Image (spheres, grey):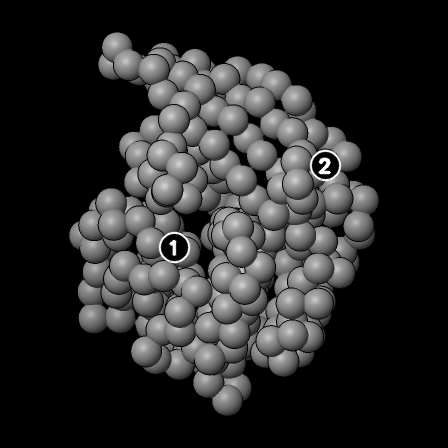
Amino acid sequence: MIPHTQQWFDSWFDSPFYHILYEDRDHSEAQQFMDNLSNYLNLPENGTVLDLACGKGRHSIYLNSLGYDVTGVDLSENSIAYAKQFENESLHFEVHDMCKPFNKQFDAVFNLFTSFGYFEKDNENLDTIKAIQAELNEYGFGVIDFMNSTQVIENLVDEDIKTVHGIDFHQKRYVKDGHIIKDISFSAEGEHYEFQERVRAFTLADFEQLFEKAGVHLLDVFGDYKLNKFHKHSSERLVMIFK
């Protein structure tokens, strides 16, 4: 199990098994989202983008291929070490805590694929919003792509097994203390592992309160990667544009 002194994402995101479990993510859908988002925001040619909590850099790499100057940051040293092989003059990766402002301003700051709401303390979530605001230049836009917590909870699959590369990942999901929690257990290479994902079940109303406290202005809300209108009970995603 994860030591109590350690936040769950410190160990899970640095584990090779995290990337095995989620290796089937839809890259074409992610690229379509980046196309739609950059067109909607009308980012300047060669514009600067901060990919906040970039993981191994799949969004950063694609955004860079579209001509943007991209910086990807993540708390996972292993993920950043992997991503650095793709660096070039306009693509850079650094280890960084997203609660703290980065030392540069950008035309856009993207926080994608539910990479928010990990922290136990409310002030850390608020600090992240404030940090994003500080990272935007005068014309910049912030984007948070979060799960639609209402839809997720209403359609929660309590338990299942997902087999990837011969590893049976046992997944149990439940809601507790305002968090959507997934317990993950499996055996691999002769050892047994247990991890947990804990994400705050933030709703649009919760984000609106955070934005108000941070002095951030919510400009638009979408419900999927095609940028369709958000519907509380049916939308797959909660995509918020702000500045």
Seen from this angle, which residue lies furthest top?
190
**Closest to the observer, 136 or 68:** 136
Mark 2 or 1 closer to N-term? 1
Q: Residues within 10 Å of mark 1 (few under 14, many from 20)?
A: many
Q: Residues within 10 Å of mark 2 (few under 14, many from 20)?
A: some
Which mark lies nearer to you, 2 or 1?
2
Name the residue: 45% across, 43% down. Answer: 27
Q: Position of residue 29 (x, y in %)?
A: 53, 46
Name the residue: 34% across, 68% down. Answer: 70
Q: Is residue 149 above or below residue 156?
A: below
Q: Position of residue 148 (x, y in %)?
A: 69, 47
Name the residue: 63% across, 80% down. Answer: 215
Q: Which of the 4 image quadrants contains residue 100?
A: bottom left
Type of residue at label 1? Cys
**Closest to the observer, 228 or 139:** 139
If the image is split into quadrants, where does the C terminus sit? Answer: bottom right
Asked if residue 46 can be seen in this view, the reply is no
Q: Position of residue 48 (x, y in %)?
A: 38, 76
Tag 2 residue? 153
Mark on residue 54? 1
Label 1: state its secondary structure.
loop
**Closest to the observer, 168 or 205:** 205
Q: Is residue 6 above or below residue 61?
A: above
Type of residue at label 2? Ile
Q: Is residue 43 left or right of 92 when viewed as pictured? A: right
